[in-house]
Amino acid sequence: MKEKKKKIIWQQWVSMVFFLLVGGLCGILMIRYIEPMMEGKSSNAVFLFFAVAIIELYAAIFLQIIIHEAGHLVFGLLSGYQYSSFRVGSLMWMKVDGKIKLKKFSMAGTGGQCLMVPPEMVEGKVPFVLYNLGGSIMNMAVSTLFMVLSFVCGENFFSMFCIIFAVIGYAFALMNGIPMRMGTVDNDGYNALSLGKKESALRSFWVQMKANDLMTRGVSLKNMPEEWFYLPADDELNNSMTAVMAVFYCNRLMDEHRFEEAYATMERLLNMETAIVGIHSGLLRCDCVYCELIGENRPEQREKFLDKQQKKLMKAMKTYPSVIRTEYAYALLGEKDKEKAEKILENFEKCAKTYPYASDIASERSFIEKAGKVAAEKEEEVNEKTL
């Protein structure tokens, strides 16, 4: 496989510069409010003022994340969707058997996520605009309210919080609403734009949401309707939503233990120019490394999937079951370090206790068992040769 040249996506630079400017603006606003209150105060009081300002900044960010996801929830419900899960940071409230249960789950590049069950498609259509843009709409609306409050409450800590809260909210609304690819994931605006371009993209979106609903109920990919999974034509892979179906197709092959077929398909996809988002591309690379380890186990083949960017993503997703499983297989079959593999296995069991999708854990356990079986067979072969 030829190494792809790393591309610097201009949207990532735009978002970075934008948030730096927002941070600078918040800093200026904090100084503007604190400076008049500093007159005649001791150095301890000044330190306390700045500490309060920093706390208000972080509180504003945290609350705006909640408001953003609440926007997806509210507008999703208005569009006929049903509640599935609501995540802030790594805390996830998921509906299981009619009850809301707290789980732990995190995804690189996201501060939160609200997943819902879509209504049935009617003539190939399903409402998607309000659900996808609901977060930005809610950020904008609430921020406008707090901007007004900042002007009527005088110059005090509450007023400072209101204007910082509003600035952060407007930033969230713009950076999630204006279509952009944000590195490992696409933002809401980009998703909405992709869904509006092709009917196949809308179908893909619907399948993803329905599959997530079944996963919350313990159904594995291999036991879901077969017609949901297909490999899109090459000319359809330039749409990020349609490209997800290629990822799902590979995931199902893995779940069915069709490792050789999965490896060939994933390697081909990774060699192509597609709209597969960074996080999915990284997880496909994890699966390629695993397939190579349990297969021919060629060092040069497995290492080319583990470049600097991939290692960085795996570190950011160190609690993700498929990442842990790949690290386990690498320790066992690549490094031949049983002690290290056992420690990684302990970490897997720890994560499995709070991971939201039981079907994923069951699949990953089967992959771990497969790696252990291959390691035992290799060891037996070595022992027979030494006799």
Image (cartoon, rainbow, N blue to C red):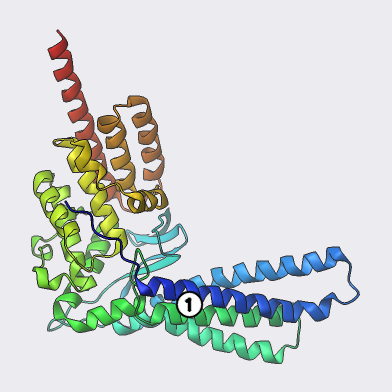
From this view, report whether residue 298 is shown above or below residue 311. above
In the displayed structure, does residue 144 sit left or right of residue 327? right
Residue type, mark 1 in image? Phe
Which quadrant of the structure image shows residue 206?
bottom left
242 with respect to 103 (left or right): left
Q: Secondary structure at mark 1?
A: helix
The quadrant holding residue 268 is: bottom left
Quarter location, residue 324:
top left
Q: Is residue 299 above or below residue 112?
A: above
Image quadrant in which the C terminus is located:
top left
Nearer to the camera, 192 or 256: 192
Q: Nearer the viewer, residue 357 or 251?
A: 251
Horizontal and vertical percent position of residue 212: 26, 62
Using the image, determine if residue 206 lies above or below residue 1: below
What residue is disc 1 on? 172
Counting from the top left corner in percent of width and height, residue 269 is at: 16, 59
Disc 1 packing (10 Å; few <14; some 14–19; many ≥20)? many
Please indicate, yes or no, whether residue 80 appears anywhere in the rendered image.
no
State whether residue 371 is above or below residue 180.
above
Residue drawn at point x = 15 percent, y = 80 percent: 199
Residue name at image x 23 percent, y 84 percent:
196
Quick check: 107 left or right of 288?
A: right
